Image: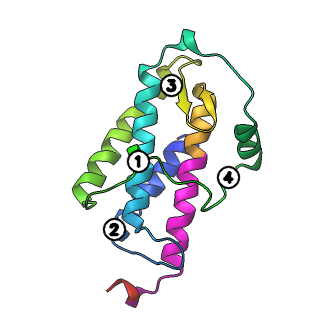
């Protein structure tokens, strides 16, 4: 199992806590972080699948270089694009459907061309390897937030 698959499985294990919010850690609920992570994952995987490998051109990007070298995203520095934000009530059913889609699409990653690509708003055009690393960093970023929310929220706060 790849690192990304393990991160997605860990995300899935957080579904039972989807309603928990701790404003001291994040304004958003655990469910919002799950939903956002899955929206990003599924949108990026679809973009990779539909990309044209022959159109990929490597270009140096300072922001990508710094973040990829650090190996994490600083918290609270960037707002999620509207296309990957939840505006409606997040349901267990929707989360489960998004997880099923993500797991199905992750299985297809190995069959993609190494220059399958995704255009990130800050990092520019990413090839398959760079995109997988972005998805690992992004998913891990939200898992850390979820874990902090859960760690700093007592059981009584959840009732």
Q: Earlier in the sequence, mark 4 or mark 1?
A: 4
Q: In the displayed structure, does residue 92 sit left or right of residue 35? A: left
Farthest-out residue, top: 54
Which numbered disc, 1 or 3, marks the residue closer to the eye? 1
In percent of width and height, residue 70 lies at 76, 49
Which is more toward the observer, 128 or 4? 128
Residue topped by disc 2 = 16
Residue positioned 56% across, 9% down in the render: 54
Q: Earlier in the sequence, mark 2 or mark 1?
A: 2
Residue positioned 67% across, 58% down in the render: 74
Q: Earlier in the sequence, mark 2 or mark 4?
A: 2
Q: Which image quarter: residue 87?
A: bottom left
Report how far apart the C-alphas of labels 1 and 3 lie in the structure: 29 Å
Assess whether mark 4 and mark 2 are in contact (beta carbons under 8 angstroms): no
Is residue 107 in view from this perspective?
no
Residue topped by disc 3 = 110
Which numbered disc, 4 or 1, marks the residue closer to the eye? 1
Residue 107 is labelled as none
Report how far apart the C-alphas of labels 2 and 1 lie in the structure: 26 Å
Residue positioned 48% across, 78% down in the render: 23
């Amino acid at each position: 199992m790849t690192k990304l698959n393990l991160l997605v499985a860990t995300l899935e294990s957080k579904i039972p806590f989807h309603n928990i919010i701790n404003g001291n850690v994040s304004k958003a609920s655990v469910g919002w972080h799950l939903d956002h992570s899955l929206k990003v994952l599924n949108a990026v995987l679809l973009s990779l699948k539909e990309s044209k490998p022959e159109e990929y051109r490597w270009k140096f990007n300072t922001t990508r270089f710094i973040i990829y070298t650090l190996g994490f995203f600083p918290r609270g520095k960037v707002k999620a694009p509207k296309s990957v934000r939840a505006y409606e009530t997040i349901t267990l059913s929707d989360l489960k459907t998004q997880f099923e889609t993500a797991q199905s699409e992750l299985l297809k990653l190995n069959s993609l061309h190494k220059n399958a690509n995704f255009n990130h708003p800050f990092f520019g055009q990413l090839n398959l390897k760079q995109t997988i690393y972005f998805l690992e960093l992004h998913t891990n970023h939200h898992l850390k937030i979820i874990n902090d929310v859960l760690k700093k929220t007592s059981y009584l706060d959840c009732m």
